[in-house]
Amino acid sequence: MPVRTLKYSKFLKETATNYQYISYNRLNPPSGSPHGAINYSFQDALRIIKPYIRSRWNEQMKVVMPIAAYLALFQIIVLRQQVNEWVQVALGIVSVIGGLMMFMEGLKLGLMPFGETIGYYLPIKLGKRTVLSIAFILGIGATLAEPAIGVLKEAGRIVPPEKSPLLFAMLTNYSHITVIAVAVGVGAAVMLGILMFIYGWSLKPLIFSLLVPTAALTIYASTDPMLADIIGLAWDCGAVTTGPVTVPLVLSLGIGTAGVIKHKHSKRLQGFGLVTLASLFPIATVLLAGIFIRHFLALDIAEPSHTENLISSLSSSTIFEGILLGIQAIIPLVAFLWIVQIAVIKEPIHNQGIIKYGILLALLGISLFNIGLSYGLSPLGNQVGALIPAAYSNIQSLENSPFFSESVGLWVCLLFAFFLGYGATLAEPALNALGITVENLTNGAFRKPLVMISVSFGVAFGLTIGVIKMIFNVPIVWFIIPTYLVASILTLLSDERYVNLGWDSSGVTTGPITVPLVIALGLGLSNASGAVDGFGILAMASVFPIISVLSVGLYVRRMERKKELEGQ
């Protein structure tokens, strides 16, 4: 077996910590080897890298497999229906796990070093206006690189154009306008978030200054039948934006800016509030984009646009399209980060080999994720969603439907949604991190298990309400306005700490797995049940955690005051 000499790096240091002979060779390089190099065979290299890959694979498998298994088992055992094309679905899910594994590692090694360097040096070397401009562009680029953003285009293939012409147009011919509207909303949120970090602005007035006009736009859209169809899409887009790319990249820039300027309030709950802003802004921008398309552009739903035709002619399969979307997402973002660091702040790029490796991983990962999404997660979610109405009503294409009596079938559907929301949220790694942060910031008053239970229960209840909306075809505006009114009242009554934590907790529900599954589930359910559209479930899954966390926060605060009075 030939001996390979690999340069010792941070990457190998992390993967080889359990191998004592590697440490020995590092301290005592064999004769003839360059200083700091390690000589070992290809088999030794595989033994070193194997635990590294296994740990990353297991991290993503723990998130993806329980949800996928729950959906498949529910379809097979409860609804007594086979999973169509189960081999393709299984391979797609494996592709999703592998894609997320590579993408998350690539994000950490290839993109985050740019964000950390730019976040530190940018406010030192440039003025505030330039910082805000770069933050705006970074917010746009990070949103376009989000793995879940591709689900919007995927959803357009399921929406029936005859039922929702404007919604169909915004997800197909004018999908680029929809995606740009989401990205611009996040860019504006990042700018406002940085100003909030610098000047220590309270989140409460910012929430109401965004929520009031967004609610007004929603009410206006509800008066137009065409615009009413896009309300669910707009509020769901707020959930798509706060994923694994946007949040860490823009937080590194915002916290770095606030830390350098050192405003007297900049350390207060540093980092909180940005997720909230990034969730609210895109709702308004997508609604405005829908109004623009509705009144100023022709709704051509018969033929795809020139861009769609070009992609269709070039693409022999969904695999090509997944790779193309990955390139479009990663390369422009990396180019922008590279230009800012080299040409704007003029700082050298350290560890270029590791960064190039990370960028390649991110590119391969997001492409593999897109392919798995098309072949695995979206078909599985759509299948289950299409079968759920057969639990309580007759579906002509399904024999022996309804599978249960109407009352039992409805309870089966609602319990399915509840446990899906609860389990999927508990599996999100971000929830565990949020629980630890909340416990530390509240000095143990708001315990981590209580945080996790309250957020998971909120998501579960929100998904259940969303399914009720689909089953009974209730306009989404009837749920959005009352629930956000309740959240607003609780916000007024709550302490600033819990407002930050409560509103940011909605971002935990929007992982790269939850978003495509829930949207596919909703679209499948809407098509089978005759609902106008399948959007809005994510919106409900986002608002109810706010309500639950703020409610529990009020209870915790009340107990704190009670103990203080008893101690006097």
Image (cartoon, grey):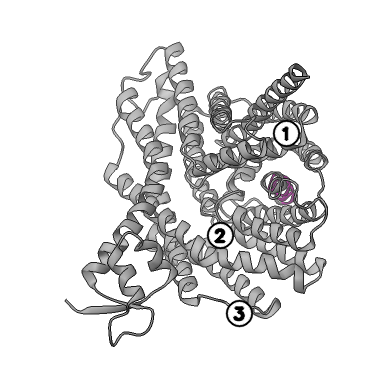
Mark nearer the N terminus (3 vs 2): 2
Vertical placement of 251 versus 349: above or below? Answer: above
Left or right? Give the position of 509 relative to 316: right
- Main SS of the magenta part reads helix
**Image point (58%, 33%), residue name:** 541
Left or right? Give the position of 256 relative to 82: right
Q: Which amino acid does label 1 sit on?
A: Ser
| The disc label shown at residue 145, or none | 2
Q: Give the range drawn in magenta.
A: 282-292
**Image point (65%, 28%), residue name:** 475
Seen from this angle, which residue lies furthest left? Answer: 1
Tell me, yes or no, if residue 26 can be seen here: yes
Vertical placement of 141 versus 193: above or below? Answer: below
Mark nearer the N terminus (1 vs 2): 2
The answer to which image quadrant residue 439 occupies is: top right
Residue at label 3?
348
The answer to which image quadrant residue 84 occupies is: top left
Q: Residues within 10 Å of mark 3 (few under 14, many from 20)?
A: few
Of the residues tagged 3 and 2, which is closer to the observer?
Answer: 3
Q: How crowded is mark 2: few (under 14 residues within 10 Å), some or many (20 or more)?
A: many
Mark nearer the N terminus (1 vs 3): 1
Residue at label 1?
222
**Image point (26%, 62%), residue name:** 47
Indicate yes or no whether the magenta region holds residue 17. no
Seen from this angle, which residue lies furthest bottom? Answer: 32
Tell me, yes or no, if residue 163 can be seen here: no
